[in-house]
Image (cartoon, rainbow, N blue to C red):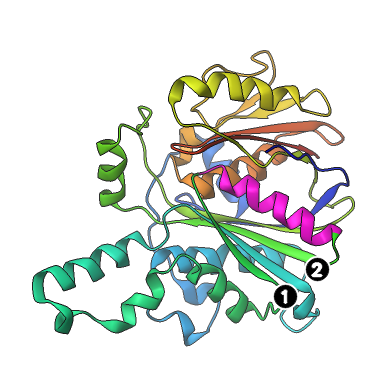
């Protein structure tokens, strides 16, 4: 159930798509000024790629490609300058193309099979974002999609570590996109899974991972998640996850859903206070902005409490 990283995994590139912008430094400055946002405005995929493959794609896929593109750019990897067959892609997906799925369903209910637009269906499958990322960016290595709640972003990083250790790939791009849909929130509400979340958000995060130490940070521990069935189980599982850490943290990035604030005396990064709850995207935002706030040589603890499936923690060194 829990498997920490034995060999370090380096972060070579980062990319974000957030309601406050697409540049990590710019977003951090806006947050420091007290700005808040939960809806992405004026998003143009052509600013990231000229590919016409995405002309019918939903926001979840567009966000994924944009964040992935930024991650490659930040690592200095221009198109055609690297061996794409040795770069893997893992997408962490919570709900996928909810907007297109709802639209496809409504067409069928209202008009029957003849009213359905077939071109929508391929965009509703969960692995569509990973497919688009690989195709648009020329990444021909292994490709996988993991489904779950926010903690599946940590699962994706653990899988990337396996691929690197097994030499399945030399680099692995982990991307976590999420699009907002009111129908999704209604669904969580019907199962009493809202956890009193006040602001729902959307966007994506991406990490380009390599073997060894990384120029932007190094992941030294990540567990594969501690599953729960009931909320009352979370506190005990969270304590178990924290007990497996290989070092004492210096900075803590919290998801906001923890049963108690871990290491309460330490500096705390609460990115969701500014950007809202974006499920898997938020889990990677915590790592990106948490590391930015961590002094060189120090350790960041990033915690993740999923809405319906897992508790997970990750530790990275700046």
Q: Position of residue 268 (x, y in %)?
A: 63, 25
Is 287 part of what is drawn in magenta? no
Element type at mark 1? loop
How far apart marks 1 and 2 lie (CA) works out to 8 Å
Q: How many marks?
A: 2
Mark drawn on residue 141 = 1
Residue at image location 44% in from the left, 70% down from the top: 44
Give the overall secondary structure of the magenta segment.
helix
Q: Earlier in the sequence, mark 1 or mark 2?
A: 1
**Nearer to me, 73 or 307:** 307
Is 163 part of what is drawn in magenta? yes
Q: Is residue 236 above or below residue 200?
A: above
- Report the magenta residues as a range: 150-165
Q: Residue furthest top?
A: 265
Give the class, few, some or many, for how many residues have Cα within 10 Å of label 1's Cα (few <14, many ≥20).
some
Element type at mark 2? loop
Q: From the viewer's perspective, tell me whether residue 211 is left or right of residue 60.
A: right
Give the class, few, some or many, for how many residues have Cα within 10 Å of label 2's Cα (few <14, many ≥20).
some
Q: Position of residue 139 (x, y in %)?
A: 68, 77
**Nearer to me, 215 or 162:** 162
User: In the picture, which quadrant includes the C terminus?
Assistant: top right
Q: Residue furthest left?
A: 110
Q: Position of residue 184 (x, y in %)?
A: 31, 49
Tell me whether the residue at label 1 lies in contact with that at label 2, contact meaning CB atoms closer than 8 angstroms.
yes
Q: Is residue 225 above or below residue 174?
A: above
Residue at image location 79% in from the left, 50% down from the top: 216
Q: Position of residue 85 (x, y in %)?
A: 76, 79
Mark 2 — residue?
168
User: In the picture, which quadrant includes the N terminus?
Assistant: top right
Q: From the viewer's perspective, tell me whether residue 295 is left or right of residue 307.
A: right
Q: From the viewer's perspective, tell me whether residue 208 is left or right of residue 115.
A: right
Q: Is residue 155 above or below residue 65?
A: above
């Amino acid at each position: 159930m829990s498997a920490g990283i034995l060999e370090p995994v380096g972060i070579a590139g980062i990319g974000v798509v957030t309601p406050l912008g697409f540049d990590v430094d710019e977003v951090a400055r806006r947050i420091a000024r007290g700005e808040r946002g939960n809806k992405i405005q004026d998003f143009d995929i052509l600013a990231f790629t000229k590919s016409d493959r995405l002309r019918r794609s939903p926001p979840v896929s567009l966000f994924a490609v944009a964040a992935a593109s930024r991650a490659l750019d930040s690592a200095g990897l221009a198109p055609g300058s690297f061996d794409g067959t040795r770069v893997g892609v893992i997408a962490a997906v919570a709900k996928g193309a909810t907007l297109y799925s709802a639209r496809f369903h409504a067409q069928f209910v209202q008009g029957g099979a003849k009213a359905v637009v077939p071109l929508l269906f391929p965009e509703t499958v969960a692995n569509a974002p990973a497919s688009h990322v690989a195709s648009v960016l020329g990444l021909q290595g292994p490709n996988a999609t993991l489904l779950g709640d926010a903690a599946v972003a940590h699962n994706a990083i653990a899988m990337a570590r396996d691929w690197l250790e097994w030499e399945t790939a030399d680099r692995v791009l982990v991307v976590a996109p999420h699009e907002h849909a009111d129908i999704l929130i209604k669904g969580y509400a019907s199962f009493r899974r809202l956890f009193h979340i006040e602001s729902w958000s959307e966007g994506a995060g991406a990490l380009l991972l390599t073997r060894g130490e990384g120029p932007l940070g190094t992941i030294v521990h990540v567990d594969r998640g501690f599953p729960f069935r009931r909320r009352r189980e979370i506190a005990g599982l969270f304590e178990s996850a924290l007990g497996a850490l290989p070092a004492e943290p210096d900075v803590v990035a919290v998801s906001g859903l923890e049963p108690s604030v871990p290491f309460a005396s330490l500096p705390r990064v609460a990115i969701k206070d500014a950007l809202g709850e974006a499920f898997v995207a938020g889990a990677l935002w915590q790592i990106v902005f948490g590391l930015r706030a961590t002094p060189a040589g120090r350790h960041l603890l990033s915690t993740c409490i999923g809405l319906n499936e897992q508790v997970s923690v990750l530790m990275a060194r700046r």
